């Protein structure tokens, strides 16, 4: 069974920072902008050798319980129930640009009751809660080369779901109150609201939508000891919490540790990272860094 540590070791061994050609990804001449990066991430997570299109689907089927969908999180989940990590892939225009999450709340973990999940995700295998990783890549447009790749546990990036839902529901209630006070018509919606009776002939609808953004890992962790931004090379930074690191199989942890001595590779412990869900707490873990 694969996991993120084996996937990262596979990525480092192949030193692969090139997104795949759109050929073999889709039979259509039109491929969504983020699709090559998504396939790139799924390939190294499933231990698929770069460019080996023939075994791609077979490898995916062996290790993933859920393959993702175009408009709903997550983008992929490992088999293994609560031990099978979930991933969200984000292609950024610049390394420090905020992550556009659209209508999805930021996530510190994935639960089977998280909003926006499809039934196929919830029912793919028995599970309740999974570790949730953001995989964020900055792609050089002219070469399709991944210049920076961050793989970060959501608990280092985001507050709890309850925090975001409380804010969301408070704003939604304010929108509802405004609609009622101004004799407008509220249309039930998963958004903040849809409003009618705006114009005399009731020809228009106003959609009030939440559009979430999350600070990029590069901006969040740029001053963390062990992080080194080199814009002339392709650089991987992966932050794995101690609480999760210790639960991965010993063989997986040793696979990463055995890369010691590989040119451009380092494995260090980080401490003192502010806990997004508790201002009085700090978090520690392992920082995997590789450059080529």
Image: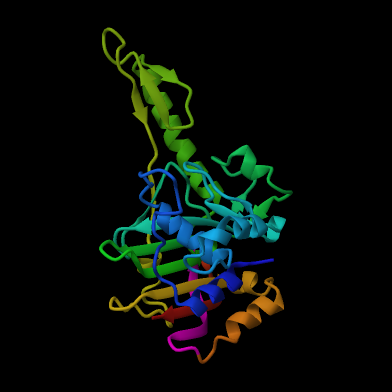
Q: Above or below — where is 256 with respect to 36?
A: below
Most extreme residue toward the top, as rendered? 201
Residue 56 is one of the magenta-drawn residues: no
Most extreme residue toward the front, as rendered? 54
Please state if 71 lies on the left or on the right of 218 as rendered.
right
Q: Residue at x 47, y 41 (%)?
A: 71
Name the quadrant containing residue 95: bottom left
Q: How is the image coloured?
A: rainbow
Q: Residue at x 30, y 58 (%)?
A: 93
Q: How many marks?
A: 0
In percent of width and height, residue 73 lies at: 52, 47
Most extreme residue toward the bottom, as rendered? 261
Q: Is residue 257 visible to us here?
A: yes
Please state if 255 lies on the left or on the right of 134 as rendered.
right
In percent of width and height, residue 181 lies at: 37, 19
61 or 139, which is in the foreground?
A: 61
184 or 13, which is in the foreground?
A: 13
Q: Residue at x 40, y 65 (%)?
A: 217
1 or 235, which is in the foreground?
A: 1
Q: In which quarter of the image is the N terminus?
A: bottom right
Q: Give the range drawn in magenta.
A: 262-276
Q: Residue at x 65, y 67 (%)?
A: 2
Q: Above or below — where is 168 with respect to 233?
A: above
Characterize the magenta stretch by its predominant secondary structure. strand
In percent of width and height, residue 87 lies at: 54, 57
10 or 245, which is in the foreground?
A: 10
Q: In which quarter of the image is the C terminus?
A: bottom left
Q: Is residue 278 visible to us here?
A: no
Q: Above or below — where is 127 with respect to 4?
A: above
In percent of width and height, residue 276 lies at: 49, 61
Residue 267 is one of the magenta-drawn residues: yes
Name the quadrant containing residue 237: bottom left
């Amino acid at each position: 069974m694969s996991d993120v540590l084996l996937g990262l070791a596979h990525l480092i061994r192949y030193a692969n920072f090139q997104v795949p050609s759109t050929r073999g990804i889709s039979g259509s001449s039109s491929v969504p902008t983020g699709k090559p990066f998504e396939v790139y991430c799924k390939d190294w997570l499933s231990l698929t050798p770069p460019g080996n299109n023939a075994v791609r689907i077979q490898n995916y089927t062996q290790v993933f319980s859920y393959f993702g969908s175009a408009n709903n999180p997550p983008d992929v989940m490992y088999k293994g129930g609560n031990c099978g990590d979930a991933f969200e892939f984000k292609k950024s225009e610049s390394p420090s640009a905020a992550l556009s999450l659209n209508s999805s709340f930021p996530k510190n973990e994935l639960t089977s009751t998280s909003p926006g999940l499809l039934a196929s995700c919830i029912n793919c295998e028995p599970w309740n809660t999974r570790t949730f990783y953001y995989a964020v890549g900055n792609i050089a447009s002219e070469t399709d080369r991944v210049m920076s790749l961050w793989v970060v546990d959501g608990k280092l990036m985001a507050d709890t779901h309850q925090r975001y839902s409380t804010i969301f529901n408070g704003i939604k209630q304010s929108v509802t109150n405004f609609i009622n006070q101004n004799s407008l018509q509220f249309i039930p919606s998963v958004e903040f609201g849809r409003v009618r009776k705006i114009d005399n002939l009731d020809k228009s609808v106003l959609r009030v939508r939440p559009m979430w953004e999350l600070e990029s890992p590069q901006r969040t962790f740029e001053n963390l000891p062990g992080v080194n931004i080199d814009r002339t090379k392709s650089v991987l930074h992966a932050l794995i919490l101690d609480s999760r690191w210790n639960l991965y199989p010993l063989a997986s942890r040793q696979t990463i540790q055995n890369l010691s001595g590989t040119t451009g590779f380092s494995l260090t412990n980080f401490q003192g990272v502010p806990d997004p869900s508790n201002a009085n707490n700090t978090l520690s873990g392992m920082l995997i860094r590789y450059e080529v």
